[in-house]
Image (cartoon, grey):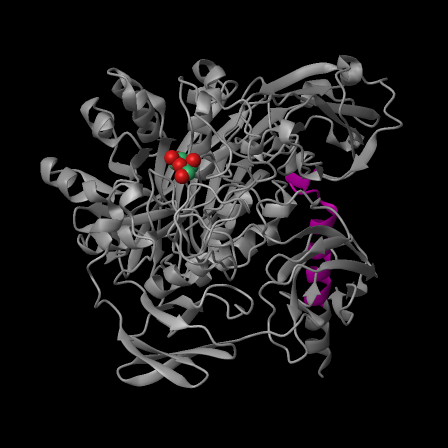
Amino acid sequence: MSNKFTYKYYLLLSICLFIVVTLSAQKLPRERKRFTEEWLFKKTTDSSASQIQYNDKDWRKLSLPHDWAIEGPFKPEYNPRTGGLPIFDKAWYRKHFKIDASAKGKIITLEFDGIMYNSSVYINGSKVYERPYGYIGFEIDITPYVKLGSDNVIAVKLNPEMLASRWYSGAGIYRNVWMEIKNPVHVKHWGNHISTPVVEKEKAKVKVETMVSSKQKNHVGKYQIKTSIVDADGAEVAKLMADFKFISGEAKIIQELEVVNPKLWDMETPHLYKTVSSIYKNNIVVDTYTQQFGIRTISYSREGFFLNGRRVKLKGVCLHHDLGALGTAVNYRATERQLQIMKAMGVNAIRTSHNPASPEQLDLCDKMGLLVQEEAFDCWAMPKVENDYSKYWAQWHEQDLRDMIRRDRNRPSIIMWSIGNEIREQNKEDGYLLARSLSKICKEEDPNRPTTAGFNNFSVAIKNGLAAEIDLVGANYKPSDYASTMQQHKDWIVYGSETASCVSSRGVYHLPLEKYDKHPSLQVSSYDNQSPGWAYPPDVEFHFQDSLPNAIGEFVWTGFDYLGEPTPYGGKDNLTHGNWDTDWPSRSSYFGAVDLAGFPKDRFYLYQSRWTTEPMVHVLPHWNWEGSSVTEIPVYCYTNCDEAELFVNGKSYGRKKMGVDKTIVPVAFNAWKNRPKNFESPYRLNWNVLYEKGELKVVAYKNGKEAAVKTINTAKTPNQIKLIPDRKVISADGEDLSFITVKIEDEDGNFCPLADNKIEFKLSGPATIAAVDNGNAASTEPFQANYRKTFNGLCLLVIRSKKGAAGEVKIEASSAGLKTSAIIISIQ
Ligand code: GAL
């Protein structure tokens, strides 16, 4: 190496080192960190818990997010309608914290993603904020209340009431909390509004509105904003500078940037970009704010819903926000697993029924290419249950609705805003006035997306003018009205905002086939012949969707079972339901295509057969009918292939073609009493088979060729436990989870479909049991335990890593009379 070259090399290296060292020594203009560790919790009515000096030594230490209600116990007096769990009470959270003296002159804010509910926040004894609605996030500027360099106490009072929800809401600071330290001049909370007025193959125009706030008394100096667009690889693909001035402490800057050859956000390729807004004062960066977004177009017409110009049918599901046995405490992995299971069923759209979703759920939808209908409310000013949101409606609804849209309007996944579900104002002559004012708020906050609502009293909502006030008219359980309504209203787009509500329990088959309102077992048969009076089997929706091929689609009630609302058990009318204890211990819903533990029911495969193209076939029921008085078994097969053939012990029962038997659907849609016991439809294949133990096999054919096979064998007595983790390696971040399916098998490895053995779990290594479940909607075994009975052969163990503790975790599962089993999960 020549001397000259060596000199240049060292000079360059020194400059680089200098830059790196200087930059890392300099504090970022905005620090954002989670504020979720080392909280204290107690259920108490003592209002002095807001005070700094309050003695909280004996309070329980925990990390957020936290849902106290999921800890149980189950009791009928807690109301089965909301899960039979204690979602009401008076409770406090406290946290002692310090902020470094170097934050002098800075703005310090806390952001709560959601508190369930009726929360008041105190800093060092002063009440600084309150918010009744549990599903909305908010930011609090705590600067005037904190002491730098010394101890501070935040105290949060929660006062969730009984009879305040129609489902399990959870209770507690159940979403994330963040602290930000920023300069007095900074981009406001949810301060970006990004839209894409032009999207073409060669270029996209990206309009970025940025709201900057100044807490400084005078605004002397030169202010500039640099907005960059950065792609998923971190490359800057566009940038623009602008000068700006403050007027009364605020500035709104509108910039239009161009992205060449944009990578569109789509369902298969959910490309994301982000804007980076840097605010300069006298050429020094005083704030940097990033916002994720996507480039895509959406449009709706009577010819369908179009994403990037391509017609897409909504294969949607409604989801409540609970994560089954984990309750409502937000967990990224548990949310991701729910959505992955839905995608495997063929789902492309989620309705966040009936409230704003967690940021994590929406982040995942953006990332996974799922479309979202985000819903604001389940009621307006007229109550559905005594203590619901209607109590706060007058004071809060406008802010809650605006905040939902401001928080989420940059998300490519969101394709419509719902202003409400089955709101009772649909029955009022002047109900349209409220619908009008809510739609107006939506348009003011986001002129680029349509509004919608789900009506159950459909014809009345039309008559009273509510349906005319929204862009997409959602009909709950009225598939036979789609066509006629669109006929009568030539500019309306009507779709299924809630469909089916078919009920079943995983692995339960009541034979001989029977119709009942309720079954003494508190379970519901999986032959899809049970659905409440207002609802119907999925096939009926398929029939009406198929008769309107350009209709925008449906949202099934529901993708997953959820806690609470155990229809058909318990329950009376909404406002007088006080005691839902008649059918205790039934405490969670039966509507899901997937049970509460995440195990697919048969109906999962029915939707999969309709919504996916990879050849699949499914057969039901199980094949363990020895000892039963039933000799003839109805066998149903779901497939996306053309035809299927059924074999029992190698003997063919013949091939049947999909779509051939078209006679039953209209009959099935008639009043409940007229529905047939044996549900036949063009969307499934049926055989009646004389039971003989052995092998039940179904072979599906596509274009005449064998394409998919499913075999079930009669199982012998339970003999062994199989542990099947969804992930064998998880992260040591204290939040990551492994979901372990626990399956009972006979000595030959056949699944035992009736097994109800109680399994005990032993963990050694750096992890804890986060939850156990088995999908039985009528079980009061605790979700937090080291044991669980299997329900129809399956149960679930969820383990959680410990923060900063890597290593191997050995999980042992044992049960009297069964071979013990063990697996290792690696925590990294
Ligand atoms: C609908 C309602 C849902 C759920 C469902 C059960 O009317 O919108 O929240 O209660 O019924 O079928």
Total marks placed: 0
Q: Is residue 473 magenta?
A: no
Left or right? Give the position of 35 relative to 751: right
The image shows residue 218, relative to residue 281, as above or below, that is above
Residue 513, percent from left and from top: 40, 56
Q: Which span is picked out in magenta?
A: 11-35
Residue 810 falls in image quadrant = bottom right
Which residue appears at 58% of the width and 17% of the height? 217
Q: Residue at x 72, y 20 (%)?
A: 123
Left or right relative to 407: residue 766: right
Residue 202 in sight from this viewpoint: yes
The percent coordinates of residue 283 (x first, y second) are 55, 39
> Which quadrant is home to the N terminus?
bottom right
Task: Note whether 369 is above or below 119 in the view shown.
Answer: below
In the depicted view, which residue is nearer to us: 320 or 530?
530
Picture coordinates of residue 823, whole percent (x, y): 75, 70
